[in-house]
Image: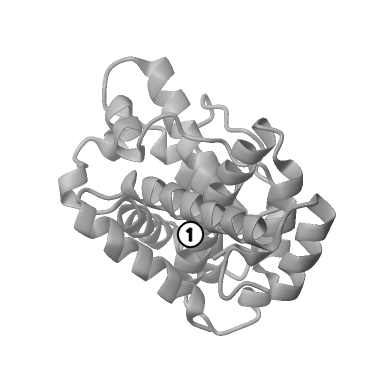
Amino acid sequence: MTSSAASHARPRRFATTRWSLIQQATQGNEAPARAALEELCQAYWLPVYAFMRRQTRDVHEAQDWTQGFLASLLSRDSFAQLSPERGRFRSFLLAAARNFSSNERGKKNAVVRGGQIVLQSLDYEHGEQRLARELATTATAESLFERQWAHAVLDRVLQQLREEYYSTERHALFDALVGNLGGAANEGSLTVSAEKLQMSPEAIRVSLHRLRKRYRALLRNEISQTTNTPAEVEDEIRHLFLTLAQN
């Protein structure tokens, strides 16, 4: 259930839902709107960049398109007609990226938009490393977006879980068990961890159960912030893991 790249960039945690951030952005107060949408851009830039990389063979153009698209989202008008009832945030972002790239195609000169809006630097070099294997396949732009979205969600959830354990001085326990979050537990690994942490076999299994339970709770909370109903949460989780299971 973990993402292989979870140990890289430290994602920012959200204090509120994606939908409420969008609603802030449609209101008249410019400072909170920009801060809210900048946070969204920082969280979701890699799935967008993956999509743009498949839309054009020019790496620099893909970067310009990504920057332009994200900057365009910092306009309140981009979200004026959007509400939770109209769809999931993942679907909205993909559709918006598709429309943006379609409009950009055919233009002679790429332009970086939103000159008066400051975005934190996007690490395109790291993005290229993350995308290298998948860009070498025939996966569609939509598929690349979906997989990178799934990884982004799991990365953030895993980071939240790590922060919880580290903040309560349980970092050694977390580091020992995190490799067993998904699938069947490795009994040999658990035995070694129990000995290293001076815990009984039963205690280490209980700790793993609690770690997994907390991970699932954080995942559902994360997904619930981009959906509208409990039924959509379960469907979105199934979609996420189905996406990751596809080659």
Identify the residue at horizontal 64%, vertical 44% (top origin): 162
Q: Position of residue 195 (x, y in %)?
A: 82, 59
Where is residue 7? Give x, y as percent: 71, 52
**Which residue shows up at 48% across the image and 82% down it?**
246
Observer-nearest of 193 and 231: 193
Residue type pointed to by label 1: Trp
Apparent side of residue 108 relative to residue 16 in the rendered image (left or right): right
Pinpoint residue 223: horizontal percent, then vertical percent: 37, 51
Residue at 69% x, 74% y is 187
Judging by the rendered image, the residue that carries numbered circle 1 is 149
Question: Seen from this angle, which residue lies furthest left?
Answer: 85
Count numbered badges in the picture: 1
Q: Is residue 120 left or right of residue 190?
A: left
Compared across the picture, whether 13 is left or right of 88 comes to right
Residue 56 lies in what quarter of the image? Answer: bottom right
Front residue (pair 78, 154): 154
Label 1 crowd (10 A; few <14 / some 14-19 / many >=20): many
Name the residue: 27% across, 53% down.
88
Quarter of the figure with the N terminus: bottom right
Which type of secondary structure does the marked residue at label 1 adopt? helix
Residue 56 seen in render: yes
